[in-house]
Amino acid sequence: MNVYDSERILESLDKKGFTETKNSDESDLIIFNTCHIREKAAEKLYSDIGRLKKQSNTKKIVVAGCVAQAEDSEIIRRMPDVDMVIGPQTYHKLPELVSKLDKNKKIIETDFPIENKFNLLARRKRIEKKPTAFLTIQEGCDKFCTFCVVPYTRGSEYSRTTAELIEEAKSLVDQGVVELTLLGQNVNAYHGESLTNSTSNLARLIYELSKISGIKRLRYTTNHPNDVDDELIYAHRDIEKLMPYMHLPIQSGSNKILKSMNRKHSVEKYIDIIDKIRSAKKGIAISSDFIVGFPGESDEDFNDTMELVRKIEFAQAFSFHYSPRPGTPSADYEGQIPQVTKSERLNLLQSLLKEQQFQFNNQFIGKTVNILIEKFGKEECHLVGKTPHLQSVFFEDTRKSYKIGEFIDIKINSMKVNNLSGELIESS
């Protein structure tokens, strides 16, 4: 979602005459778009600003995103060189506010606005032409997991209407997009207004978007187990454009820890959902999120997580050690786990997840997969694309016959944990 927000910020500033540069020495304006999920990301902001050391009095520094929302005036107190702090719900005001910046006045804009920012953002005109795009359909979260800052930085759940999402999707297709990833902090809690003025859900929205002829692939992320319903599972079975991949975070394999996290689901419910998904869509790739070292996690609790991973066999997963976030309930829990223990457990978990990802990728050796070419590789004549299962594939195109945005068949002949490589299957 930060990538999506950054694109919208660039698009809005483009209309004010700004162009993007990767070289901070050349810039008049530097924007840090931030995430507050983990402590490391928040602290990286301060170290990056510290290294920057504003080169001139005319250069302006803006901090946007969730760290801005959570820490607002504290950012300017710690880093006086920062000129503006703006939250993720108000970045549509950035073009107007930038014109008001001067070296003597600081701007803090972190209130939750009454107006809908998506209605105020201009029609999308993408600066970087790519065949894939993110589309935010839902923001915020009402789940209040005890470790998570999202309800406080992004607010309560809000869903955009089906009509406006179809309009934006068609606009993206007109600009060359063939694959859409639907975004939300809790994407399958989507409950926007349908085309018939009733309430839609994620599955019905996917059905509507799949009718757009230019869209060839659809994905979505990220889910909560409590909002996976039969309609969504059947959508994977019935909609060819919906890719065989589901990211379904569980966080822990211990019911005790899940309860302490306020996840409101059990391990048994999660396993049941996975069984239903795999029955509906054979070969679907399942990924997840895990937090190890949550307060009160015993060796037995951690072993329960390892057992769950062995049982499910994930195609890939994201795993982290617990990071206490200020203002969240679990930050004040007793039974905080020592860092050395968290690191040991994370290493064990990641080793197992890496082994499973290797095994998942290994099954594609010798098979032909259809990929969407997304970018050039680092090596000459190399192109990179994605499979339906979201694996990166490298291949060599010595004749330079293919372009970014095309679909081609590749025979996989080697693999690593994080990618596949293969050779072109020449069409007759």
Image: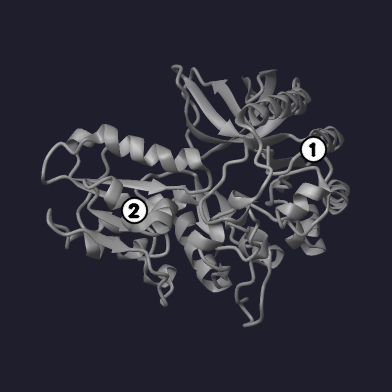
State the image quarter where residue 71 is shown: bottom left
Residue nearest the observer in this picture, 194 or 136: 136
Report the coloring of the rendering: one colour
Q: Can you give x and y, in whole percent of width and height, for residue 281 in the image?
A: 82, 47
Figure quadrant of the C terminus: top right
Q: Can you give x and y, in whole percent of width and height, for residue 284 in the image?
A: 78, 42
* Amino acid type, callout 1: Thr
Residue nearest the observer in this picture, 55 or 172: 55
Q: Residues within 10 Å of mark 1 (few under 14, many from 20)?
A: many
Marks 2 and 1: which is nearer the front? 2
Look at mark 2 in the image and give the residue it sits on: 74
Alpha carbon of mark 2 to alpha carbon of mark 1: how far? 37 Å
* Amino acid type, callout 2: Glu
Q: Can you give x and y, in whole percent of width and height, for residue 258 in the image?
A: 76, 51
Residue 320 in sight from this viewpoint: yes
Are the two marked residues, 2 and 1, in contact with CB atoms closer than 8 angstroms?
no
Does 421 sit above or below residue 255?
Answer: above
Question: What kind of element bears circle 1?
Answer: helix
**Residue lying farthest to the bottom in this orientation:** 197
Q: Can you give x and y, in whole percent of width and height, for residue 381 in the image?
A: 46, 19
Which numbered disc covers residue 305?
1
State the image quarter where residue 337 is shown: top right
- Position of 349 with respect to 159 (left or right) is right
The residue lying at 69 percent from left, 51 percent from top is 242
- Position of 168 with respect to 252 (left or right) is left
The residue lying at 21 percent from left, 46 percent from top is 81
Question: What kind of element bears circle 2?
Answer: helix
